[in-house]
Amino acid sequence: MKVCSKCGAQNQDDAIVCSACNRVIYSQSANVAAQPITQPAQSVRPSALSVVALVFMIIGTVATSFCTFGIGLAWCLPMTISYGRNRKNGIPVSIGFKVCSLIFVNTIAGILMLCDRSTSI
Ligand SMILES: [Zn+2]
């Protein structure tokens, strides 16, 4: 069942124009499909530096958790995942997070994050 957006008349599913007002009917689902799904990830391109920083975050996670007998995973893993997600979605990363990454996860990753303009606020 298609409902006309102009007059509200109900039409057949395969109706192209409204039987009551002759207006072209666009079904709800067709409208959604026609609209391009815009994601912030496409507008803000993650820089190469942030990719390297993420790699060092992963290395840092493995190294820190190894040195702390797995305890480091408690903070390294959520931080790496959160950084990776923010980077992918183009969400800025706070200075505090970068400094914490530098101290608690990986020094090189933290420095790269601080140098990286694409993820800064
Ligand atoms: Zn109509």
Image: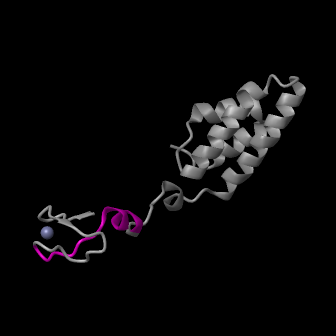
**In the picture, residue 38 is in which quadrant?**
bottom left
- Viewer-proximal residue, 31 or 116? 31
Q: Residue at x 34, y 66 (%)?
A: 31
Q: Quadrant of ligand 1?
A: bottom left
Q: Is residue 65 magenta?
A: no
Q: Is residue 31 magenta?
A: yes
Residue 42: image x %, image y %? 52, 61
Residue 95 visible in the shown view: yes
Q: Residue at x 61, y 45 (%)?
A: 85
Residue 63 shown left or right of residue 82 in the figure? right
- Viewer-proximal residue, 26 or 89? 26
Residue 117 visible in the shown view: no
Q: Residue at x 63, y 57 (%)?
A: 47
Q: In the rendered structure, which segment of residues is drawn in magenta? A: 21-33
Residue 51 shown left or right of residue 93 in the figure? right
Q: Is residue 27 above or below residue 66?
A: below
